[in-house]
Amino acid sequence: MPKKIGPLDVYNMLPKTNCKECGEANCMAFAAKVVERILTVEKCSPLLQEKYRESLEKLRAMLRPPVKEVLLGSGDHVAKVGGKLVMFRHELRYTNPTLIAVDVNDEMPEADLVSRVKQIEGFEYRYIGKLLKLDAVAVRSTSQDPSRFGKAVEVVAKATGLPLILCALNPEVLENGLLAAQEKHPLIYAATKENWKDVGELALMYKSPLAVTTKGDLKLLKSLTNTLLRLGVEDLVLDPGTSFMEGLNDTINNLTQLRWSACREDDLLLGFPLMGAPLAVWTKGDEVPEVTKWKEAILASMLLIRYADILIMHSLDAWVLLPLTILRENIYTDPVKPTSVEAGLKTLGNPTENSPVMFTTNFALTYFTVTSDIESAKKDCYLIVVDTEGLSVESSVAGRKLTAEKIADTIKETGIKDKVRHRKLIIPGLAARLRGELEELTGWEVLVGPKDSSGIPKFLEEQGYT
């Protein structure tokens, strides 16, 4: 098991000048943030000097993530996969959210191909202030015709800027696709025990990352990885094979073993991003489509939880993809630090000097629920967001993160008294206990609003706000 790195390990290799050029108070504070992956060693200016080159290289090697980070795509659509630091998210946090790709194939008519690509590109859903989207297009060669595959890749490359995954086992077919998308820096899928040399040389020639696949044989996968690394291919993605129903247990176990080998055993030959292909459920072909989509959604969620860094999907149905993207968003948040928004004064709609003034906490889910309910009712108002370290109203009141003093201070800091003529503050019903003390501290009249933000529009109407 690799040694756990502490701040002192990093500090001992720093110049120890305490110059503060990194923005931290001293080198030890900087070392602590480097260990937490908040800062990189390159932020230390003295360390970049020639005389510290050896220390810099040793630090980079020490801080190397167990799972290598691999880039695919180009321009504004570069995607990072892998780069994982820990086996379990509670140990630190996960980095580089799982890339979700949806497939097209080279036997589709050009118009259908472009239409499907635009559907992939156009999928989006706003969730707690973030726009959830799909990340890549996987172009599959179902025709096994090199020229046809090249043409399909060309059409897709012109239709979207999203990263591409070129899927074929025939090296000649793959090369035609690479010629059509060489500026896109696509991921090549895939090298096998039969074609590894030819496909590996393609990866070197076109400087593209390469996926390696076997049918559940981890020893063979490791051997192929070693062989390709010796060939000179450095950016690899590992696919141990994806099965459902009777093969599901092996699929999950294989992904888990690969990630364990990288993070717990520091196995450099297996320390690469992992790929899963939920679209494998479509190979059966004799089921009702809705049942297959349901299976694909279930399999994708399992692979996402069990360490897959790339997923290739087939279904474009919102009911399949939306839960998956929301699950991904929740897995890739910091488990120690609640999702929060910036505190301060927010304006909803076009408030005037007579508009209502309310407050809420900076817990992202609370904030976006409140603003959504207010905006959907087309109510103009001022909303004061109080910093509660990302806690909800009820939790922050109980934990003394939301107090009358803090609310009073925030009111002063926002300058809201200069924006409205009245002195009325509407507070959440779950913070009702703070009413009396808040009135004493601010001199404002405090109105206790509903406990649930869905009741705000009706409450405002009852108070005479239109």
Image: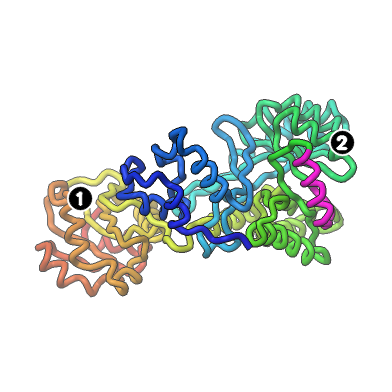
The label shown at residue 414 is 1
x and y percent of residue 360 in the render?
30, 60
x and y percent of residue 111 in the render?
73, 30
Between residue 133 and residue 372, name the one nearer to us. Answer: 133
Visual colour scheme: rainbow
Q: Give SS at disc 2.
A: loop
Examine the structure image and report whether residue 227 is included in the region drawn in magenta: yes
Span of residues in magenta = 213-230
Examine the structure image and report whether residue 381 is included in the region drawn in magenta: no
The label shown at residue 87 is none
x and y percent of residue 326 in the render?
55, 56
Q: Is residue 50 above or below residue 4?
A: above
Cα–Cα gap, marks 2 and 1: 63 Å
The kind of residue tagged 1 is: Thr
Between residue 197 and residue 29, name the one nearer to us. Answer: 29
- In this view of the protein, can residue 294 be seen by the observer? no
The kind of residue tagged 2 is: Asn
Q: Is residue 145 left or right of residue 432?
A: right
The label shown at residue 170 is 2
Image point (61%, 60%), residue name:
2
Q: What is the chief secondary structure element of the magenta stretch?
A: helix
Q: Is residue 328 left or right of residue 103?
A: left
